[in-house]
Image (cartoon, grey):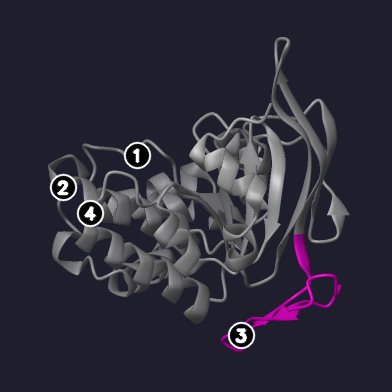
């Protein structure tokens, strides 16, 4: 594949990947005197599945938090859809079309699955709080339209049977699927997944992998994910960027990364004199 082509590239299975959707340029993030990220540059292409991997403490979640607006880097630039992004709050980033899931599930445990997923539509709602409270006219029509979108997501992720169940009663694997549903309800251009397979058994991982591929294929959603299961990463990803101690040590196709000696050393803990 030709990843220098500004127009995109073609994957081994014939999928067409577009131009640059997001670019991180020389990102440096510090906490006190400690660098969590040091001078990292990489891009995310339209329509691809881009993995960010590395050993524990490599700075992967910090990078995802920079992308989603939770952290503002001290140095470097974030570019999205061809424009330099100023410092933004997470809700402003969400309004740009970026949605995410979290390493630790962040759902409303006492609310039903349906109501949790409906919160993902907040960035799409145009009527004010008063109109929504009265639930009449335009507000009523808008909620019905949003409800239809949510029902399609519920069907897509095969969770119709739990739609009215309080989230707190669900097993872990289904909670992760509900969190994915809430992110999808926002109709994101870029979907960020922070360890979507963490804590899952083999069957749950297979289900989640299938849904991630389907989201990318059927919705055309660009996906950036952090994942520790290397089998999952190599099977799902079009390209992989590898971090270690806050620095980039590898970037390329799964095969290129798998054969990168610096990556092998980082994961095996090899020391050099």
Query: Could you tell me residue 213's position as x and y percent?
Result: 44, 73
Quarter containing the N terminus? bottom right
Judging by the rendered image, the residue that carries numbered circle 1 is 105
Q: Quadrant of residue 117?
A: bottom left
Q: Earlier along the polypeptide chain: callout 2 or callout 1?
A: 1
Specify whether residue 119 is painted magenta: no
- Label 4 with label 1: CB-CB less than 8 Å: no
Q: Is residue 31 above or below residue 28?
A: above
Specify whether residue 20 is painted magenta: yes
Judging by the rendered image, the residue that carries numbered circle 4 is 174
Q: Earlier along the polypeptide chain: callout 3 or callout 4?
A: 3
Q: Earlier along the polypeptide chain: callout 1 or callout 3?
A: 3
Cα–Cα gap, marks 4 and 2: 6 Å
Q: State the extent of the magenta-drawn residues as a range.
A: 1-21
Query: Could you tell me residue 155's position as x and y percent?
Result: 29, 74
- Label 4 with label 2: CB-CB less than 8 Å: yes
- Label 3 with label 2: CB-CB less than 8 Å: no
Q: Quadrant of residue 74?
A: top right
Residue 135 in sight here: no
Q: Nearer the viewer, residue 123 or 153?
A: 153
Residue at 42% x, 76% y is 214
Q: Which circle marks residue 171 in the picture?
A: 2
Q: Secondary structure at mark 2?
A: loop
Cα–Cα gap, marks 3 and 2: 35 Å
Q: Is residue 42 above or below residue 108?
A: below
- Categorize mark 3 by other alpha carbons within 10 Å: few (<14), some (14-19), many (20+): few
Query: Could you tell me residue 11's position as x and y percent?
Result: 64, 81
Q: Earlier along the polypeptide chain: callout 4 or callout 1?
A: 1
Judging by the rendered image, the residue that carries numbered circle 3 is 15
Residue at 65% x, 64% y is 256
């Amino acid at each position: 594949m030709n990843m220098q082509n500004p127009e995109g590239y073609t994957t081994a299975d014939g999928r067409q990947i577009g131009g640059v959707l997001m670019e991180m340029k020389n990102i440096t993030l510090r906490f006190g005197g400690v660098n969590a990220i040091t001078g990292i540059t990489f891009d995310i292409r339209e329509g691809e599945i881009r993995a960010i991997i590395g050993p524990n403490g490599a700075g992967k979640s910090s990078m995802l938090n920079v992308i989603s607006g939770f952290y503002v880097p001290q140095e470097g630039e974030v570019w999205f859809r061809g424009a330099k992004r100023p410092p933004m709050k997470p809700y402003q980033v969400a309004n740009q079309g970026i949605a995410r899931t979290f390493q630790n599930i962040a759902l409303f445990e006492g609310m039903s699955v349906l109501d949790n997923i409906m919160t993902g539509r907040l960035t799409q709602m145009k009527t004010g709080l008063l109109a929504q409270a009265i639930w009449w006219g335009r507000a009523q029509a808008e909620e019905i339209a949003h409800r239809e979108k949510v029902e399609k997501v519920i069907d897509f992720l095969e969770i119709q049977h739990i739609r009215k169940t309080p989230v707190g009663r669900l097993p872990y694997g289904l909670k992760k699927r509900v969190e994915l549903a809430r992110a999808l309800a926002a109709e994101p251009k870029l979907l960020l997944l922070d360890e979507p397979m963490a804590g899952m058994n083999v069957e749950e991982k297979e289900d989640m992998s299938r849904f991630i591929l389907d989201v990318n294929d059927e919705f055309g959603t660009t996906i950036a994910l952090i994942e520790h299961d290397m089998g999952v990463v190599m099977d799902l990803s079009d390209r992989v960027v590898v971090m270690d101690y806050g620095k980039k040590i590898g970037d390329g196709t799964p095969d290129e990364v798998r054969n990168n000696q610096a990556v092998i050393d980082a994961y095996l803990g090899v020391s050099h004199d």
